[in-house]
Image (tube, rainbow, N blue to C red):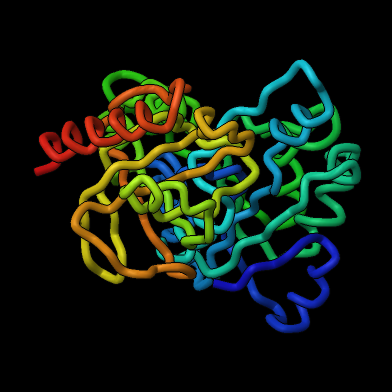
Amino acid sequence: MYLIRGIGNISTFNKKFPNQSMSGTIGNFDGLHLGHQAILNQVKDKAQDSSSASLVFFTEPHASEYFAAKDVNSTPPPRICPWREKVKLLKNFGIDFAFFLQFNKSLKTMTPQIFLDEVLARLNLKHLIIGDDFRFGAQRAGDFDLLKNWGNSNGTEVIANKTVSFNGSRVSSTRIREALLQSDFHLAKDLLGRPYTFSGKVVYGQQLGRTLGVPTANLWIPKQRLPIAGVYAVKCLLGGKLFNGISNMGIRPTVDGSKPVLEIHIFNFNESIYGKRLTVEFTNKLRDEKKFDNIDLLKEQILQDISQAKKILE
C-alpha cells in the first residue's frame, strides 16, 4: 500500500502514478470494524469493476482530538488503535492507496469548495463512497449533497455507504469504545470482527517488575488515550507463538508514577525481548489500578492477580 502524506504530496503522487484512476472513501476508520470493512469492500468492488485502484482518506489527529486539545474542559475519545496500526490494517485489507491528511489549522479552516478543488479534483476519482450524513470543511458546511453535485460535474460517482448493524444497533467506533471502556471484550470482538488487541514495541522501563520477581515487558504507547485502564488477563503473540499473561495499563501510583505505562507479565517466560513487537489481546478485566501503602502489598496483589488470570486463561 502506498501512503500519500498530505496535500503537498499530491503532485508527487500524480507523477509517480500518472493517470491512476481510483475508487475511494473518507473517514477516521478507527478500529477498522465491521462497518468500515463493509465500506472498504464496496470500494474494492467498485475499483475492480472499473479497473481502478482503491483509496482511503483519513486525518491525523482525528478532528475530535484536535478540538479537544484546544479546550481545557474537553477530553478526546480514546483511540481504538493508533494510526500505525490503522495503516497496517488497511494494508492487510488490500487497500492500494491511503491518503493521510494532517488535521491542523489549515485543514480546519479549509472551506468545502477549496477541499473539493485542491484535494479531490486533483485526483482521478471514479467513485467516492461515504455516509449520507458525512460532513466536511470549515464549520462542517460540506455535506453529501454538495459532494454528489460536485461528482456529477466532475465524472465522480458519489455513493452512500451501506449501514451495518449488530443486535439492532449500528456498528460504530463509538459503540466499540464504550464496550472496551466497560471491558465487554465479547461485544467488542463481535463489532470489530476480531479480538481487540494492541501491538507495540517492547521498550526499556524502570525494571520495577523484575525487582519484585515479576518481570514485565513495557510497550510503547501512543500519546492518545487508549480505551483500557487497569489490570487484565491477556494473551500475547510474540514471534508467532501465543503466551498467557497479565497486563497493567496505568500510571503505577504506588511508585509515584505520572505517565501511562502498559506493562505485560508473560507467564513461564524469561527471554530478553527488547525492541521486538508484542501483540496483546485483552480477555478479562481483573481490577482497577490502585495505590498500595507499600511495595510488599503491591507484590502480594500482583501474585493474586497472576493466580486469578491463570484460572481464567488455562
Side (left or right) of 279 relative to 17: left
Counting from the top left corner in percent of width and height, residue 106 is at: 90, 45
Relative depth, front residue between 163 and 170? 170
Residue 186 against residue 40 in the figure, above or below? above
Counting from the top left corner in percent of width and height, residue 146 is at: 75, 36
* The N terminus: image quadrant: bottom right
Side (left or right) of 258 relative to 105: left
Counting from the top left corner in percent of width and height, residue 94 is at: 43, 66
Q: Residue at x 67, y 23 (%)?
A: 75
Side (left or right) of 28 relative to 215: right
The answer to which image quadrant residue 220 occupies is bottom right
Residue 147 against residue 69 in the figure, above or below? below
Q: Residue at x 76, y 16 (%)?
A: 73
Q: Is residue 104 visible?
A: yes
Residue 257 against residue 13 in the figure, above or below? above
Residue 156 against residue 130 in the figure, above or below? below
Counting from the top left corner in percent of width and height, residue 137 is at: 81, 37
Q: Residue at x 42, y 59 (%)?
A: 45
Q: Is residue 46 visible?
A: no
Relative depth, front residue between 4 and 15? 4
* The C terminus: image quadrant: top left
Q: Residue at x 47, y 44 (%)?
A: 262
Total number of numbered labels? 0
Relative depth, front residue between 12 and 183? 183
Relative depth, front residue between 116 and 242? 242
Residue placed furthest toward the top:
73
The answer to which image quadrant residue 103 occupies is top right
